[in-house]
């Protein structure tokens, strides 16, 4: 991250907590992908939004337009993820909710 211009909102600790098991090469790939996303958006500095999008891409692969979710699937997924958030609020020492 030393050679990449970072926005003030970038927190390396948050990135580290969200990338357990990443090797040095994985982290370098993440930083490069975030920088590419920022450049494509016309930004001079990499933001946390860029890092989050890069993490999704690195961990889950590039977005596939053929995998578009129906409204019903989106609703069910929202309920499912909301359940994680509710449990997280009531379990001490849980991993923090990031989005």
Image: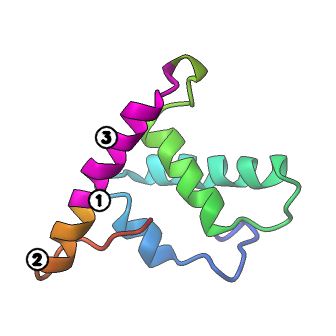
Q: Position of residue 62 (x, y in %)?
A: 56, 30
- The residues colored magenta run 67-83
Could you tell which of marks 2 and 1 lies nearer the N-terminus? 1
Examine the rendered structure and indicate whether residue 65 appears above or below residue 5.
above
Q: Is residue 80 magenta?
A: yes
Q: Secondary structure at mark 3?
A: helix
Q: Position of residue 43 (x, y in %)?
A: 85, 61
Q: Quickly name the residue at label 3.
A: 76
From the viewer's side, name the closer residue of 62 and 30: 62
Q: Quickly name the residue at label 2.
A: 91
Examine the rendered structure and indicate whether residue 94 appears above or below residue 20.
below
Task: Evaluate if marks 3 and 2 touch, with contact meaning CB atoms under 8 Å apart.
Answer: no
Q: Which quadrant, please, contains the C terminus?
A: bottom left
Is 38 positioned to the left or the right of 97 in the image?
Answer: right
Question: What residue sits 31% from the left and 40% below the top?
Answer: 76
Q: Which quadrant, please, contains the N terminus?
A: bottom right
Q: Position of residue 34 (x, y in %)?
A: 65, 53
Is 6 positioned to the left or the right of 91 in the image?
Answer: right
Please tell me whether the stretch drawn in magenta is mainly helix, strand or loop.
Answer: helix
Q: Secondary structure at mark 1?
A: helix
Numbered tag placed on residue 82 in the rendering: 1
From the viewer's side, name the closer residue of 66 and 20: 66
Is 28 positioned to the left or the right of 26 in the image?
Answer: right
**How many discs mark residues in the rendered view?**
3
Could you tell which of marks 3 and 2 lies nearer the N-terminus? 3
Q: Position of residue 9 (x, y in %)?
A: 64, 80
Question: What residue sits 36% from the left and 52% below the top?
Answer: 22
Task: Evaluate if marks 3 and 1 touch, with contact meaning CB atoms under 8 Å apart.
Answer: no
Cα separation between marks 3 and 1 = 10 Å
From the viewer's side, name the closer residue of 19 and 28: 19
Q: Secondary structure at mark 2?
A: loop
Q: Is residue 32 magenta?
A: no
């Amino acid at each position: 991250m030393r050679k990449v211009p970072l926005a003030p909102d970038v927190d390396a600790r948050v990135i580290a907590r969200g990338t357990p098991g990443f090797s040095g090469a994985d982290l370098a790939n993440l930083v490069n992908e975030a920088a590419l996303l920022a450049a494509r958006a016309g930004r001079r500095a990499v933001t946390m939004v860029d890092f989050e999008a890069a993490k999704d891409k690195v961990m889950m692969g590039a977005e596939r337009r053929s995998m578009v979710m129906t409204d019903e699937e989106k609703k069910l997924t929202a309920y499912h993820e909301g359940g994680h958030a509710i449990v997280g609020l009531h379990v001490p020492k849980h991993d923090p909710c990031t989005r």
